[in-house]
Each structure stands twice: as structure tokens, then as C-alpha cells.
Image: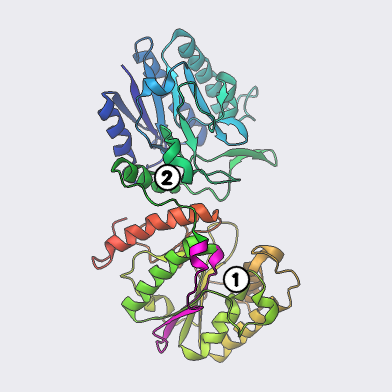
Amino acid sequence: MHIVLSFFSTRPVEGLERNHAGYAQAHGYEHVVVDGTGVFGERQGVLHRYHAIYQQLLRLPDGGLLLVLDAFSVVYAPHDLAAVAQGHDAVVSSQGQEVALPTPSGMILRATPEIRERVRALVLRLSRWAMYLPDCTAMAEVELLGQAFPVHPFHERLRSGHFASVQTVWQNGSALDSLHDAAPLVAHNAPEWERRDGLWRPSPSYDFRYVQALLEEASARASGTPLRPAQASEAAARAERAPALHLNEGAQIAFVTLHTHHIAGYADLHERSLSAYCRRHGYAYHAYREAPGFLPGDLRASAGNWAKAHLVRHHLPQHEFVFWIDADILAVDQAQPVEPLVADREFIIGTDHCAWPVNSCMFGLRRTPAMQHLADRMCERIESTPDRSSVYASGGDQQLIMETLMEFSMIDARHVVDAMTLGVSPIYATRSHRFVHFPAQLNHYRAVTMAVWDRWSTRACGDGPAAA
């Protein structure tokens, strides 16, 4: 008898519970689902998970195996559990390629007297940790887990030759492209916790919904039609093609963007999505695939984000309202027009989901003398910035645009909307949002995630808003 335990401390992405249940059913394992979403408090929720793990180990007969899954874990290659765990009584994998700390996602535990006792002792320590008792209050869950069990580097095969639980978002590389050949039992995107400034916290750019991309890839693999490797094929974008795409050039509302072959893996998805959106609603779309000649010479040599204000200013005389839109934004619910956003506004920009008052991924200006002056001032500030050597040099274009808005006393509710109205981050987004922004990701993962959302959008086109 073996058990697959699905413990959900947060609502899982659509289809994940079916993924876990399907694996258990295919092998005749018992599937136990524990809903931890009603337990309040981060530490109490963690303690609840380990109580559930201990409970299932006590239920198992000696030698039985427990596979621990969570909201970050996808059964990727449905190997026999006993075959994977052969020669091991406990498989607790590392968080990252060069991180010694463990992850609870995808753990395999064998019901033996020693393992049960280790888990019982771990539950006791975690209870003291959850109560903030001084002997372990400053520690993290993963530190306590690592003290209870040896940590197996996730990128090294087990004695059986299998990979048990693989972290798919590496900070220094790309795992997903080789995932099909590696065929791990579990692919996960659990947050990597690290101590910074004395506090344990996950990466600020962590995107929980990347799990959905793993789930789609696992489903495609199971059907015998694995998705194309996610690594962007930039070479294809270097092939001869027009330097720009211009649609509906006489329209009142326009979108402007710039993307070069360096980001073609995801930017081509953006261009296809925005082209369809603009054709549907009759908006203009100006997509530059290389820096245009009308930009100042030194600006053409800078990272593309520095050209936002100049490109908007260039097209402002042609249209009534011009939006800048980053090349990592998709039009997801394509049924929604933008006229309600710009009515009675001269300028619009959204707040950031992090600690910024604005996010320059998307902003729009109306063709008025005041907004022409604002665009000129943005361009002047950018041209006078000595270091534009990278996207984030000198604080990036976002810093310069924010400072210009502060100079014009425009960072207020007249011009700044919420973080969900324009380029909403996937951590907040649903399929019923108009535009979804995919920021601060390695290009490889950005392409994978955007491809998943683009498929959702494509399926929903013509049928009204997609389901959330």
C-alpha cells in the first residue's frame, strides 16, 4: 500500500488536483487530499502539513511509501513510486542546484519505525517553532527539515536512476528544456527561501502560477505531444524580416512597442497577441523589431526599454491616444476594449505589485499640449542619463519616468490606476483580465509562461471573456 498525499495550503492552479489524483489512480495508490487553506498563519499552516504527513505514515503498513505533493508540485513522469524510491527510506530533495536546503515538495518517505520517529520528532520541533519558542524561533521550516533528513541534490539521480523531485526554475540556468528527457517523477516550482537581512523570505520575483506551465507540459507529454522546447529560438528571429509592423495607422488609439531578436522567444508571442487584439478592435499597433532610425544615435545602442518615451512621442501626432506596451504583455481577455480606460483621461499608468508607485510596463498619453510637454520632458531626462548600459542601469526607465511624473505632480489618483487595470502581474491575474504582464523572469521561463496564457487567450477568442 502506498499513499499520495496532496496538501494544499493555498488554492491550487486549475487541474493540479486532477494531476495528483490521476497518478494515484493509475497505479492503484490511495490519494489523500488535505485542505490547509483554512489554517490561519504561515507557521501554523506549515505545522498542519507535517501533522498530516505524520498521520499518513502511521496509517501505512511497514514498507509502504508516502509521496508528499503540494500546490507547487506536478506529477510529471508517472513512474512507479517503489521503482523511484528503490534503495531509499527517505528522499528529500534540495531546493536549488547549488542550495543545500531541502524542499518539502515531492518528498518520498517510507513507513519504517525510524522514519516515523524522525517525523514525530520533527513535528515536535516544528510545533515549538510555530509557537515562537526561543530554541528555534529564528529558524526556517527548511532548516528544521534539513536537520531531520539528509538532503539529496535534486539534479543528481537516485540509486534507481530516476530523478525524484526537480526544481524547474534555476537561478543560473534552464531546467525545463531537458525535463522531457530527464523525466522526473515530480516537477515543482516551490519558492526558494533564503535569509536576507536576518529574515527568511522567498525570492521577490517568485511566480506561483508558473506551476500551470509545468502542468500543461506534463499533460502534453502524457498525450504523446510534448510542447516544443521552451528555450527561445533567437536565431529564427535573426532571419530577414521587416524591421517594423504597422497596423491600422489611422486609428485614434494606438499601441507602440519595441522588441529585438534577443527577446524573440516571448516577444513574438506578444506581437501575435497584440496584433490580434488591435485588429479586433480597430486600434493601431506599431511594433518595432529593431531600434528605428529616428531615435537618437546613442539611444539606439541602449537597451530597448530606454526608447519608450521617444517612441510614444514619435507617434503621438498621428493618434488621439498612444499607449506604450512592453513586449512581455499579452492581451488575454481580448473582448475588452480600452476606451473605458482612457475616457476623460490625459494620462494613465498603473501601480506596481512591488514597492513602486508606478510600473512603466504600460502607460498612455492623450494628444494634448500638456502631454506633449510631458513626453518631451521624459525624453530629455532619458537622454541626459549617462548610464543606460542595461535594463536596470540608473534605476531603469521606470525610475526616470516616475521622477518625471513626480516633477509634474502627476502621481495621484487622477492618473495612476490600480495594479490590475493595465499590466496585471500573473500573481494577481485571471483569464478575465485585459492585459497580463510577465515581469522579472528569465527569458526562458517568461516564454513558457506566456505561451500557456496565450493558449488560454486564443481558445477564448470569439467566446467573450475567458473563465477566471
Q: Quadrant of the N terminus?
A: top left
The residue carrying pointer 1 sits among few (fewer than 14), some (14 to 19) or many (20 or more) residues within 10 Å by Cα, namely many
Dot 2, crowdedness within 10 Å: few (<14), some or many (≥20)?
many
Along the viewing direction, whichever of 400 and 185 lies nearer the viewer:
185
Q: Residue at x 62, y 87 (%)?
A: 373
Q: Residue furthest left?
A: 463
Can residue 426 be seen from the camera position used here?
no
Label 1 sits on what residue type? Gly
Mark 1–mark 2 contact, CB under 8 Å? no
- Residue 348 lies, in percent from the top left, at 50, 75
Q: How many marks?
A: 2
> Which residue is pictured at 51% across the width and 28% down the height?
157
Q: Name the residue beneath numbered marker 2.
A: 211
Q: Is residue 139 magenta?
A: no
Label 1: which residue?
304
In x, y percent, where is residue 185?
41, 32
Residue 102 lies, in percent from the top left, at: 55, 29
236 within the magenta span: yes
Residue that appears at 44% across and 23% down: 108
In the rendered image, the quadrant that contains the C terminus is bottom left
Q: Which residues are magenta?
A: 235-262
SS for tag 2?
helix
Disc nearer the start of the sequence (1/2): 2
Amino acid type indicated by mark 2: Val
Secondary structure of the residue carrying tag 1 is helix
**Where is 379 relative to 78, above or below?**
below
**Height in image: 112 above or below 420?**
above
Looking at the image, can residue 342 be seen? Answer: yes
The image quarter in which residue 40 lies: top left
- Name the image quarter holding residue 456: bottom left
